[in-house]
């Protein structure tokens, strides 16, 4: 990363921390406790992953605590953010990352596309977390009964073209379709692993992974149980 990039990040963070401190003082005057202010990001990718796993266990068991969703947290993150994970997930309405992992404001950067497919614009959004905010973890989250995958599999099987730009989703999923032998659930898992592999080869991520500053994992979310399991 260039010297200019580092200077810009340092300046933005310094400004945000100062402003955040002023906001917390103001919040205390209005009865907002500083306990919901953004804590220091987990220093390692493994700790970030453990935090997400803990949150998902709460969600799946019906004991979610909905952290970081109060006025003090809103005030504390208004000028500065320290998200500890980027979650790349599907647009499906049943898979909101902040709920699935029982997190709140300022915890996650959520990047969502149909069947968590990526292109240069999506990749740029994913890069923002590690490159600009030192986010230590990327989670690629596929899910059970993915409608985008099912639609793509049907179009490929019938050799038909979906309307508009939906066809680009079909083409992005074609490699997984070929290797899944018609099994859509297997296709979901293969596509998740493929996206992880592409991200691991990203030129901005390779040195961070080598220095153990970044981990990229692939997961599968069960709509039935609410549980997230590791795929890659």
Image (tube, rainbow, N blue to C red):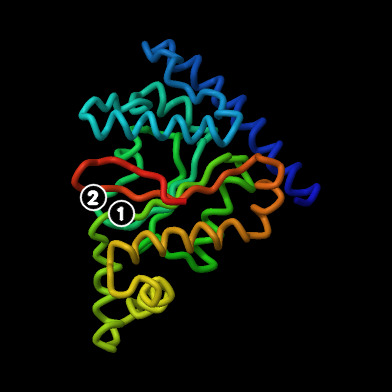
Quick check: marks 1 and 2 in contact, CB under 8 Å?
A: yes
Q: Looking at the picture, does residue 15 appear above or below residue 119?
A: above
- Vertical relation: 190 (above or below) 226: below
User: What distance separates the C-alpha of mark 1 from that of mark 2?
Assistant: 9 Å
Q: Nearer the viewer, residue 77 or 181?
A: 181
Q: Choose the circle earlier in sequence order: 1 or 2.
A: 2
Q: Residues within 10 Å of mark 2 (few under 14, many from 20)?
A: few
Element type at mark 2: loop
In the rendered structure, the answer to whether residue 62 lies left or right of residue 175 reads left
Q: Which residue is mark 2?
A: 94
- The correct choice, above or below, for 228 with respect to 168 in the image is above
Between disc 1 and disc 2, the foreground one is: 1
Which residue is at a point 29% across and 28% down the rendered structure image? 58
Residue 71: assigned label: none
> Quick check: 177 above or below 82?
below
Which residue in the structure is indicated by mark 1? 143
**What x and y, as percent, mark residue 41?**
55, 29
Residue 152 lies, in percent from the top left, at 30, 75
């Amino acid at each position: 990363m260039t010297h200019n990039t580092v200077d810009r990040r340092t300046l933005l963070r310094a400004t945000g921390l100062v402003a955040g401190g002023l906001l917390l003082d103001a919040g205390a005057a209005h009865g907002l406790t500083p306990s919901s202010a953004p804590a220091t990001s987990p220093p390692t990718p493994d700790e970030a992953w453990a935090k997400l796993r803990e949150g998902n266990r709460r969600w799946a068991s019906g004991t979610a605590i909905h952290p970081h969703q109060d006025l003090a947290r809103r005030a504390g993150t208004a000028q500065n953010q320290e998200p500890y994970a980027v979650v790349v997930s599907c647009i499906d309405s049943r898979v909101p990352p902040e709920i699935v992992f029982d997190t709140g404001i300022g915890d996650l950067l959520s990047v969502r596309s149909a069947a968590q497919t990526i292109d240069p614009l999506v990749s740029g959004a994913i890069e923002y977390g590690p490159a600009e905010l030192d986010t230590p973890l990327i989670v690629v989250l596929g899910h059970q009964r993915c409608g985008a995958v099912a639609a793509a599999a049907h179009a490929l099987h019938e050799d038909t073209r979906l309307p508009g730009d939906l066809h680009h989703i079909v083409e992005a999923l074609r490699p997984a379709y070929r290797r899944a032998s018609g099994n859509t659930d297997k296709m979901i898992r293969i596509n998740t692993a493929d996206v992880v592999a592409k991200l691991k080869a990203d030129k901005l991520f390779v040195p961070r992974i080598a220095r153990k500053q970044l981990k990229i994992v692939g997961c599968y979310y069960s709509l039935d149980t609410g549980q997230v399991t590791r795929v890659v």
